[in-house]
């Protein structure tokens, strides 16, 4: 598909350039031809004047500045030069057009590739829980004896799968929403401490279940941003910090006030992230936890976090050792 689109685009580039080139060639030829005609006319007039003056036709070499055959030859040469020039322009423009068409189409190809990969990954992630849901229900319906405890067990397991599926579809929708709103997102001035407090509230159930204390040292600061998305951003980072930490460990939040930016760091004493995984954790559906255990999600959390940070023209970075990880978000004070 892209090869034929590239050829078509090249053909269009070439057509435009050749039209311009042909137009200028015609203009050049017409101008030169006009001058040559003028020269022929001047020669003819001077011949007539000389004939009148002498009373007889003087030899041609007296009145001729340039011979007629040379003028015709000049015309022929000009035509050839213009034809060669146009052929060169055709070849160079064809090569340059093909190169430029490739460069023009590359970003579109990358976006389409990314979308196709995203669609493939999303369908794969949807297929696994749906298959297990279907199998469980089918086995349950085929069983002769259906006691209440076994029914409750099946329903509980089904509910778990449904909740996971719902989380996945919520994440996919959130990602597509963030992509769609792009720069049209409404920003307001917000207090950072308020955002962090809301994010801590969102993960309090999980932190309590693992007996993890969140130590927050966020200084008072006002930034411009989208409140709901920023709460989501810190909820994702805190949720990960708790998920990938052992019971009873600590998670810390602290901020640094720079001239035009604020650094907010979420650190934990958890499992840490392998060096090989560090470069990929912000990619969609990437999970460093290859066993895909229950605690890991779908690998969309950090992609959403990155999208939110990008939306606020900030950066997100991570440092990790086997003693824990620290995610630092840098947000501009004013957009
Ligand atoms: P998930 O939903 O699987 O947590 P994320 O996109 O949030 O997906 O994270 C991607 C991967 O990065 C996770 O699978 C996990 O292995 C790793 N990761 C993220 N945060 C942490 C952390 N604080 N400590 C250790 N590993 C982490």
Image (cartoon, rainbow, N blue to C red):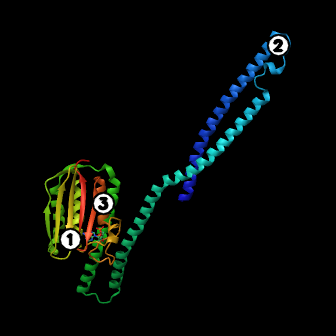
Residue at the extreme bottom of the image, as rendered: 145
Residue under numbered circle 3: 306
Instruction: Measure the alpha-carbon separation of dots 3 and 1.
Output: 19 Å
| Mark 3 / mark 1, whichever is N-terminal | 1
Q: Can you tell me which quadrant of the image ligand 1 is in?
A: bottom left
Circle 1 packing at 10 Å, graded few (<14), some (14-19), many (20+), is: many
Classify mark 1: helix, strand or loop: helix
Residue 70 is left or right of residue 331, and the answer is right
Callout count: 3
Residue 242 circle label: 1
Residue 38 circle label: none
Quarter of the image containing the N terminus?
bottom right
| Mark 3 / mark 2, whichever is N-terminal | 2
Respond yes or no on whether mark 3 lies under 8 Å from ligand 1. Answer: no
The foreground one among 245 and 125 is 245
Circle 3 packing at 10 Å, graded few (<14), some (14-19), many (20+), is: many
Q: Can you tell which of label 2 and label 1 is closer to the viewer?
A: 2
Looking at the picture, how far across and down is residue 203, in whole percent?
18, 67
Looking at the picture, how far across and down is residue 103, in whole percent?
49, 53
Residue 132 to residue 327: above or below: below
Q: Residue at x 62, y 36 (%)?
A: 23
Classify mark 3: helix, strand or loop: helix
Residue 51 circle label: 2
Instruction: Measure the alpha-carbon separation of dots 3 and 2.
Output: 92 Å
Classify mark 2: helix, strand or loop: helix
Residue at the extreme right of the image, as rendered: 56
């Amino acid at each position: 598909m892209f090869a034929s689109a590239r050829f078509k685009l090249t053909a269009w580039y070439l057509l435009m350039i050749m039209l311009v080139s042909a137009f200028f060639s015609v203009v050049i030829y017409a101008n030169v031809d006009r001058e040559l005609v003028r020269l022929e006319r001047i020669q003819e007039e001077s011949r007539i004047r000389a004939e009148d003056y002498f009373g007889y036709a003087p030899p041609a070499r007296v009145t001729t500045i340039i011979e007629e055959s040379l003028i015709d030859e000049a015309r022929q040469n000009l035509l050839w030069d213009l034809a060669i020039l146009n052929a060169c322009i055709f070849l160079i423009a064809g090569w340059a057009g093909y190169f430029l068409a490739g460069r023009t189409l590359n970003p579109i190809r990358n976006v389409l590739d990314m979308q196709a990969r995203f669609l493939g990954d999303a369908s794969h992630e949807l297929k696994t829980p749906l298959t297990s849901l279907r199998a469980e229900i089918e086995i349950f319906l085929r069983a002769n004896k259906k006691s209440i405890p076994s029914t409750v067990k099946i329903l509980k397991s089904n509910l778990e799968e449904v909740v996971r599926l719902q989380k996945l579809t919520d994440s996919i929708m959130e990602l597509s929403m963030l992509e769609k709103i792009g720069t049209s997102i409404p920003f307001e001035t917000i207090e950072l401490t308020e955002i962090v407090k809301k994010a801590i509230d969102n993960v309090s159930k999980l932190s309590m279940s693992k007996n993890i204390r969140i130590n927050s040292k966020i200084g008072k600061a006002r930034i411009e941003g989208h409140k709901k998305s920023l709460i989501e951003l810190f909820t994702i980072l805190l949720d990960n910090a708790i998920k990938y930490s052992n019971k009873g460990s600590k998670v810390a939040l602290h901020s640094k006030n720079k001239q035009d930016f604020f650094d907010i760091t979420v650190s934990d004493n958890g499992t840490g992230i392998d060096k090989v995984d560090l470069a990929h954790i912000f990619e969609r559906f990437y999970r460093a936890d290859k066993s895909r255990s229950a605690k890991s999600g779908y690998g969309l959390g950090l992609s959403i976090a990155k999208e939110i940070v990008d939306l606020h023209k900030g950066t997100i970075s991570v440092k990790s050792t086997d003693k824990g990880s620290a995610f630092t978000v840098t947000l501009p004070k004013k957009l």
